[in-house]
Image (spheres, helix red, strand yellow):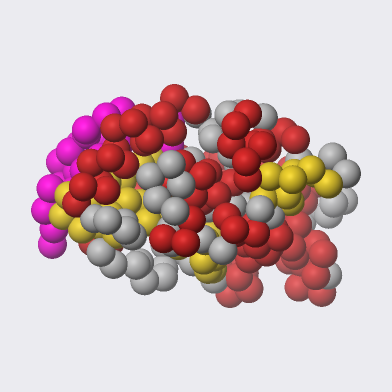
């Protein structure tokens, strides 16, 4: 079995289309994982993940590249708090917010903490989605290593976490603000009428064709005047093609619907 055959087997097994990911980068990651588990061929590895649940889960985790932390790129969260949210809240008292590719929940929980400076927790609702079901389960539990919370301002850490045996547990009041769901950006329906979409540090792994598809879908998911918040390596080239206008670095406002 060559890599093309492997991609077809993985699609049948998981529904994940590896053709939408940058091939050189993804193939290198997969080959490294296969070697680490002492398999010599794609055939042998596919047979193994079909019969071994732990091996399968490891593959999904590795494939979906779960790198996340609270308050990642702090200066961008400061722009969100000081410049973006005040304007959004003038338009919508209770904004509809989607955290796409949320990984283990660090990002949507960060959103809750920042929004709580403007709104009481009982009025905050965030949809958080990811392709990795295991990551979603971790997010629902809400236990984090110190490394995950190192960039959080001290006052937020003290207010929203309790420490249990060197683990940081997010308070239940914050967890109640977030609804976690499984979602594949490349094949599932997108939520509608969002005021803010946070989609960071995932599109860097996609092909240009896949990025084009996602940006068009994100346009359809936002209200006119809604804002898209992207990752620090994901500035959108020719954003006007998707009717996005840059309002701050890494923040784009939707000007109109596109066909």
How far from the left and from the top, in percent, is residue 56? 75, 65
In this rendered view, identify the residue nearer to me: 140 or 19: 140
Total labels: the figure holds 0
Relative to 212, is 201 above or below? above
In this image, 145 relative to 155: left or right? right
Residue at left offset 49%, top offset 28%: 74
Relative to 8, is 173 above or below? above
State which region is magenta: 231-259
Q: Is residue 16 visible?
A: no
In this image, 212 relative to 170: left or right? left
How far from the left and from the top, in percent, is residue 123? 41, 60
Quadrant for the N terminus, please.
Answer: bottom right
For residue 257: magenta? yes
Relative to 22, is 94 above or below? below
> In this view, which residue lies farthest toward the top?
75
Residue at left offset 40%, top offset 50%: 119
């Amino acid at each position: 079995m060559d890599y093309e055959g492997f991609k077809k087997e993985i699609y049948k097994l998981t529904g994940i289309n590896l053709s939408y990911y940058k091939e050189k980068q993804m193939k290198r990651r997969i080959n490294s994982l296969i070697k680490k588990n002492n398999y010599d061929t794609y055939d042998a590895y596919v047979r193994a993940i079909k019969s071994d649940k732990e091996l399968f889960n490891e593959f999904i985790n590795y494939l979906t590249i779960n790198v996340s932390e609270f308050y990642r790129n702090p200066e961008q969260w400061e722009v969100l708090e000081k410049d973006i949210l005040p304007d959004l809240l003038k338009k919508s008292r209770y904004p509809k917010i989607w955290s796409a590719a949320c990984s283990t929940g660090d990002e949507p929980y960060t959103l809750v903490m920042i929004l709580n400076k403007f709104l009481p927790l009982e009025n905050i609702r965030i949809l958080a989605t990811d392709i990795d079901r295991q990551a979603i389960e971790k997010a629902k539990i809400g236990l984090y290593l110190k490394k995950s919370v190192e960039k959080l301002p001290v006052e937020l850490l003290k207010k929203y976490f309790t420490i249990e045996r060197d683990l940081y547990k997010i308070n239940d009041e914050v967890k109640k603000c977030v609804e976690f769901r499984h979602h594949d950006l490349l094949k599932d329906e997108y939520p509608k009428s969002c005021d803010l979409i946070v989609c960071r540090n995932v599109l860097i792994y996609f092909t240009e064709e896949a990025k084009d598809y996602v940006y068009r879908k994100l346009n359809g998911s936002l209200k006119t005047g809604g804002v898209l918040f992207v990752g620090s390596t994901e500035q959108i080239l020719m954003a006007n093609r998707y009717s996005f206008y840059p309002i701050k670095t890494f923040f784009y406002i939707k000007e109109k619907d596109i066909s």
